[in-house]
């Protein structure tokens, strides 16, 4: 169990910075809505993005359980 979850976003070749930013924002909003999430830090470049999801100390889910919960949702997001 960790105090954070790291997410890596990779989009298809040719994706613009604006498109990548839109996808990253979607992921950030999904993660920020989770009750066990304290804060989400986000960096974006053309074609990729990284998110650092900080978890609350008094959370109900472990970091792995949260990853398992959101993975199917995030995998279905369009590029």
Image (cartoon, rainbow, N blue to C red):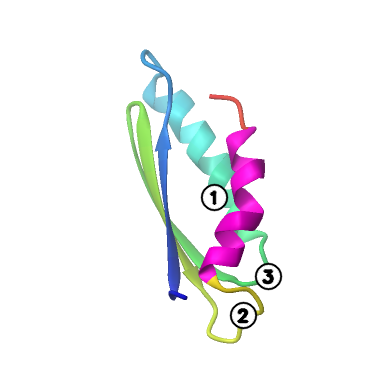
Looking at the image, residue 51 lies above or below residue 57: above
Query: What residue would you read off at disc 2?
Result: 59
Query: Which residues fall within the magenta stretch?
Result: 63-76
Question: Which structural element holds mark 3?
Answer: loop
**Relative image position of residue 57 (x, y in whole percent):** 53, 85
Q: Is residue 12 left or right of residue 29?
A: left
Q: Residue at x 66, y 79 (%)?
A: 60
The answer to whether 43 is drawn above or below residue 68 in the figure is above
Seen from the viewer's position, the closer of residues 72 and 22 is 72
What is the C-alpha distance between the residues marked 3 and 2? 8 Å
Q: Decide: marks 1, 2 in contact (CB < 8 A)?
A: no
Magenta span: chief secondary structure: helix
Q: Local crowd at mark 2 within 10 Å, few (<14), some, or many (≥20)?
A: few
Residue at the disc numbered 3: 35
- Distance of mark 3 from mark 1, alpha carbons? 13 Å
**Residue 9 in the image: above or below residue 36:** above
Residue 11 is a magenta residue: no
Q: Is residue 68 magenta?
A: yes
Residue found at the far top of this picture = 14
The residue at which mark 1 appears reads as 28
């Amino acid at each position: 169990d960790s105090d954070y979850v790291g997410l890596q976003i990779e989009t298809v070749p040719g994706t613009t910075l604006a498109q990548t930013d839109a996808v990253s924002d979607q992921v950030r909003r999904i993660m920020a809505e989770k009750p066990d999430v304290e804060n989400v830090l986000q960096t974006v470049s053309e074609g990729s993005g990284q998110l650092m999801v900080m978890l609350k100390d008094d959370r109900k889910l472990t970091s792995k359980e949260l990853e398992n919960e959101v993975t199917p949702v995030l995998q279905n997001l369009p590029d």
